[in-house]
Amino acid sequence: VQLQASGGGLAQAGGSLRLSCAASGRTVSSYAMGWFRQAPGKEREFVAAIRWSSGFTYYTDSVKGRFTISRDNAKNTVYLQMNTLKPEDTAVYYCAADHPRFQYKSFSDRTRYDYWGQGTQVTVSS
């Protein structure tokens, strides 16, 4: 599975950005997709996840009500709509695809995901 993330950039606090992650290759083997982010000097943290088949979504508390993850199965693409952005949302955002053998792991567990995109920078100014 190859993942190509795009859509990052600069936004003001309170603004919006939409990230996209296009998946190619053996996408049928993936059960769910996730978004993670990593700020300078910090660990990579979970943001949101979605199941390809059902559309079930899961978010970390800090983005609930502001971010929305969605998918377009026909395009093998996952989106992350980010609204009401805050300076603390500044980070490199990574999309990831899991492997069926790790379905028992939590969506927020990085080790669930076998495939990672290259990352896209999101910068929110105050």
Image: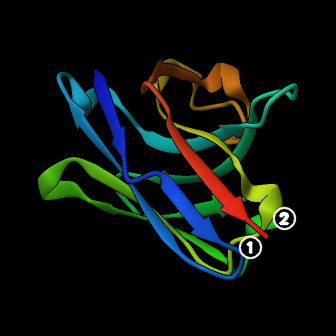
Helix, strand or loop at mark 2: helix
* Residue displayed at 74% across by 73% down: 64
Residue 81 coordinates in the image, percent (x, y): 49, 70
State the count of labels: 2
Q: Are marks 1 and 2 in contact (CB under 8 Å)?
A: yes
| Left or right: where 88 falls relative to 121 | right
| Left or right: where 72 falls relative to 101 | left
* Residue displayed at 87% across by 25% down: 41
Helix, strand or loop at mark 1: loop
The CA distance from mark 1 to mark 2 is: 5 Å
- Looking at the rendered structure, the kind of residue marked 1 is Lys
Residue 89 coordinates in the image, percent (x, y): 74, 57
Residue 45 coordinates in the image, percent (x, y): 77, 38
State the scheme by which the image is colored: rainbow
Which residue lies under the disc numbered 1? 64
Q: Is residue 107 visible?
A: yes
**Quarter occupied by the N terminus:** top left
Which residue lies under the disc numbered 2? 61
Name the one closer to the observer, 68 or 99: 68
**Quarter occupied by the C terminus:** bottom right
Q: In which quarter of the image is residue 19?
A: bottom left
Name the one closer to the observer, 50 or 41: 41
Q: Label 1: how many residues lie within 10 Å, few (<14), some (14-19) or many (20+)? A: few
Q: Which mark is residue 15?
A: none
